[in-house]
Amino acid sequence: MFNVVKKEIPMGSKTLVIETGKVARQATASVVASMGGTVVLCTVVTKAEEERRDFFPLSVHYMEKTYAAGKIPGGYFKREARPTEYETLTSRLIDRPLRPLFPDFFTNEVQVNCMLISLDKDNPPDVVALLGASAAVSVANLPFNGPMGAARVGFIDDEYVLNPSFADMENSDLDMVVAGSDKAVLMVESDANELSEDLMIGAILYAHQEMKPVIEAIKDFANEVLPEKVEFKNALAEEEAKIFDEINSKYRDQIKEAFSTVDKKERGEKIGVIKDAIVENLEEDQLNSYLKQFKEVEKNVVRENILKDAKRIDGRAIDEVRDIEIETNFLPSVHGSALFTRGETQAIVTTTLGPTKDSQITDSLVGEIKDNFMLHYNFPAYSVGELGFPMGPKRREIGHGALAKRSLKFAVPTIQEFPYSIRVVSEITESNGSSSMASVCGGCLALRAAGVPVKDNIAGVAMGLVKEGDDYQVLTDILGDEDHLGDMDFKVAGTKNGVSGLQMDIKIEGINEEILEKALMQAKDARMHILNIMDKALPEPNELTPLAPYFTQFKIDKDKVKVVIGKGGSTIKGLQEEFGSTIELQDNGEVSVFGENKEVAEKTKEKILLLTAEPEEGKIYDGVVAKVVEFGAFVTIMPGKDGLLHISQFKEDFEHLTDVINEGDNIKVKLVEVGRQGRLKLEFAES
């Protein structure tokens, strides 16, 4: 019934298993990839082109099923719903190295789905999904210039570790995922604990070396499954070449002049005029072809200027960073803020401090994760002069925010060191190149402006590449057009001591060690330049902002925790309502109190200590009469603690005790004795 092809591929100390022919046979191609107890089903479905397009409609979706980890989904409906942030980031991780391995002329619709159906604690699923997707596309009869390989690298005890487990990663100074072809590196995603450029290069090369045998094994697997593949050719090559020559001969000088215009808006207007002239008299079915070749001429002009004349669009030198302006705490009611402007890219970045209960809790498949540091990135349409309806974060915004967070996270104090939840928000107000790195710079400044003890400034810069044959130029601080028309988007963030975040996407079929090293060292020079400017703007973290909640922490006897909570939480809720504070109580008796100011927090603390204190013999208390009886009065000396003031303590002549004392009276009493079962004996305190 099944025509199964299966291959076991050694990968360091682990084994990757790929299999096809048994599951999801109606898809164009399907592969079940596994490593240990982690299993991912990867499917590919393609659809022949129905109309001429000027783009490649590839979509990649990574999905996790909670049954994979033996869990039932939370929520009312008890089923998986919208993608989690991790699923979105993993979808991007797979998409980015796959895309450049398809030829430019191929525009058929391709959908890749990777579904996690089993998870163990030793094998993270993202690398398994990357390798499974590579194998599935390789057997899908597509013009795929792969396979690609992938590997995760950790750095533990000064050694590189291949595909470390979840537990191993807790002790690692590096979390890097690398994808590449047999010839070169295609994609890098990483965060690090201030590692040197040499160590980062070493990790990338180590990963690439280790994945090469896997790539060869996937090739053998694909040849066994699909010994003869359809040969894809660009049927429109001659027509496209003719259109390119037509546009190039008529409009090249105008396009060249437009790309010598420094101002992005003015440059865009000039290019728009040229585009309108090209399409003015075209038929509907000609538009896509002419617009595609117009972009090719644009690309050719910009790349020629850079490679032949080292001339960039805005006139900068190849390794020059744009002008930077910084303003901190310019928003008067915000805990911490920074306005970071680099050329035509600008970000308003804010920091908000809150009680630890505001930490983000994520119910992941590997367990509940509590994170006191959040970073959210927003990219409104107006930042690039476009119309757009705000619809919440898309994949790109989630990805850029995650990169900025990873770059800053190593320096953000833990909740034990700094007992606040921290939320950073980056609002991109202008964009022309690397708004994610502007978010890193602005995010660090906003944190320090709020008084978060981030010891060093952290900066980021985006590098680009233009490569034709053996000729290439690495560009520092790329513009949007240089990113769009170039061959690489390489973002590096870190301190003066080393790299904290790195993301690389290659649009061609990979880069070699020489280019990688040049890009990293050129990025280091740019980072140092930006850090010097940031150090002048904010050399040290400010004092903690008075706008932040005031925090106090203390400990009570763990046996008294229930007293503070009260029946059904009534006591702790009442305290929070009474003082307008937030109380966080641990089982071991640790108490954290957040108030809008010091007075609120200290009054809350005083009341809690009073609630949990034990009566002391010989101590004088300000008591309140709770009840008068025939043989004396019960007096409340502490919350929940009443003592008896015997009638013999009253020296006055009276017919009824209520003649001299009544409920609600305030009196000073001395605790004489704590008897059996906690009974308290009182006497009047000497005045």
Image (tube, grey):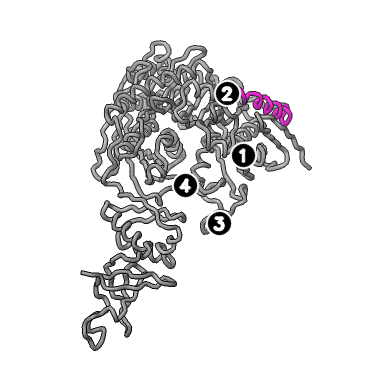
How many residues crowd mark 4 within 10 Å: few (<14), some (14–19), many (20+)? some
Residue 504 left/right relative to 649 = right
On residue 370, the disc is 4
- Seen from this angle, which residue lies furthest right? 1
> How many angstroms separate mark 1 from mark 2 (CA)?
21 Å
Question: Which residue is tagged 3?
Answer: 78
Q: Nearer the viewer, residue 233 or 30?
A: 30
On residue 122, the disc is 1
- Which amino acid is tagged 3? Lys
Identify the mark nearer the N-term, 2 or 3: 3
Q: Residue at x 46, y 14 (%)?
A: 472
Q: Secondary structure at mark 3?
A: loop
Question: Which residue is tagged 2?
Answer: 206
Q: Secondary structure at mark 1?
A: loop
- Seen from this angle, which residue lies furthest top? 308
Residues at discs 4 and 1 in contact (Cβ within 8 Å):
no
Residue 14 visible within the image: yes
Q: Nearer the viewer, residue 123 or 167?
A: 167
- Which amino acid is tagged 2? Tyr
> How many angstroms separate mark 4 from mark 1 (CA)?
21 Å
**What is the magenta range?**
206-227
On residue 15, the disc is none
Which of label 2 and label 3 is nearer to you? 2
Identify the mark nearer the N-term, 1 or 2: 1
Q: Nearer the viewer, residue 624 or 566?
A: 624
Indicate whether residue 539 is drawn in magenta: no
Residue 201 left/right relative to 113 = left
